[in-house]
Image: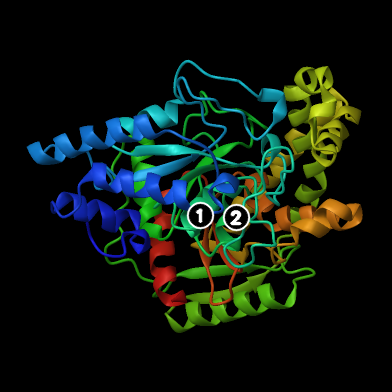
Amino acid sequence: MVKSWQNLTAAELGREIGAGRVHPVDLAERHLEAIAAHPLADRIYARTTPARARAEAMAAHDRARRGFRRGLLDGVPVSWKDLFDTAGVATESGSALLKGRVPDRDAEVLEVATQSGLVCLGKTHMSELAFSGLGLNPVTATPPCVNDEGAVPGGSSSGAAASVAFGLAPAAIGSDTGGSVRIPAAWNDLVGLKTTAGRLSLRGTVPLCEKFDTIGPIAKTVEDCAHLLAAMEGGRPTDLAGASLSGARLLVLETVALDDLRDRPAQGFEDACNRLSAAGAEVTQGRIPEVAEAMGLAALIFTAEAYGIWREVIEAAPQKMFPRILERFRSGAGFSAADYVAAWRRLEVLRKVWLDRTAGYDAVILPTSPILPPQAERLMTDDAYYVTENLLALRNTRIGNLMGLCGLTLPTMQPSCGITFLGAPMQEERLLRLGSAAARALR
């Protein structure tokens, strides 16, 4: 077994497997042992899948031995957020409402990833029904933040990010409806990719808002994210060779995204912009007024759909829910169908305006979150603090979801402060190449 295996990226581990220096079964066992021994593991993993991991790792070893590896990550273990169905294993989406729910088949994206050779370590904790950007969940567990164990890790893919940040998985698969991949990735100094809605199948994924729900990886590098995306859709990974920032045009979004920035996120973003410029990118600032209007539609569109999907389940046993999450769902009950349809029609217009205004740029950049990870104890005892921090946590990331974009968050020199690159719909390959070059500059 290679030294310091917990510090290697998913791609590096894949290369070690390909070279015969790492046995996939040993790798799976090392991770399962690390999870079992870690004092915070119960706050990160809802449950592990050791029998499955060993069987998948042995199959990967057999393929490697015969020279039939299915990709670079064949035999590499990953964690899965607890809203992806796993056959014969509970999938509860962080909620007592779904306690004991055991699907009879895998989510389609997990099926494809397994066929690509990924090894499933288990299911990670998350915000209840994925409806919070904080990662606070007193119903099941609140995972830790790698930079401050008293703070929340970001959500809703909270355990997913923590599993990577604490060395209990080389990479993780999460979901992103309003920022749920990018926030925990940023707060734990990781890379997170939000794919375009519709790029990856949602079959077998517990929904929040199906029109906005997306699937994406959380990992240590852009390269890992490129290979994980390929594994989840059964395709070829983006070629990152030769990626450069020279001549890249980047637009700093001034509208909404720079409002009320806390000091450290502001410092991290400013330093990142300077580094991108020094690496050859043309960084300019500009406003897109339509963003403010779109943000004004968010409460209606998100909550109305979420409550419409979950109303019957919630109202059958509302006492089982974390009250703040219950309140958020119920806030969608007051909107009419006519208002919902009108809001969506307007949002489609605003999306077209966004694409027109940003057509001359390679990406729009902004701070991933305007705040640092809040303290979990205060969130539990201070209602006003909870509401303010949750809305701020999700504010910048939600722009990408509202506008139907793909997005990539990268760490900056400031801990728990990420920078987001937003790309046009279905342009993940271009975004990953740009992100690969940007990541080198930001280091």
Q: Residue 290's quadrant in the figure?
A: bottom right
Q: Are marks 1 and 2 in contact (CB under 8 Å)?
A: yes
Q: Is residue 267 visible?
A: yes
The residue labelled by disc 2 is 184
The residue labelled by disc 1 is 192
Q: Residue 113's quadrant in the figure?
A: top left
In the figure, is residue 260 to the left or right of 402? right
Q: Is residue 405 visible?
A: no
| Residue pictured at 79% horizontal, 23% vertical | 314
| Residue pictured at 64% horizontal, 62% vertical | 149
Assign a secondary structure to mark 2. Answer: helix
Q: Around disc 2, counting alpha carbons within 10 Å, would you say few (fewer than 14), some (14 to 19), or many (20 or more)?
A: many
Q: Residue 256's quadrant in the figure?
A: bottom right
**Closest to the observer, 425 or 264:** 264
Position of 216 relative to 316 (above/below): below
Where is residue 114? Give x, y as percent. Answer: 33, 32
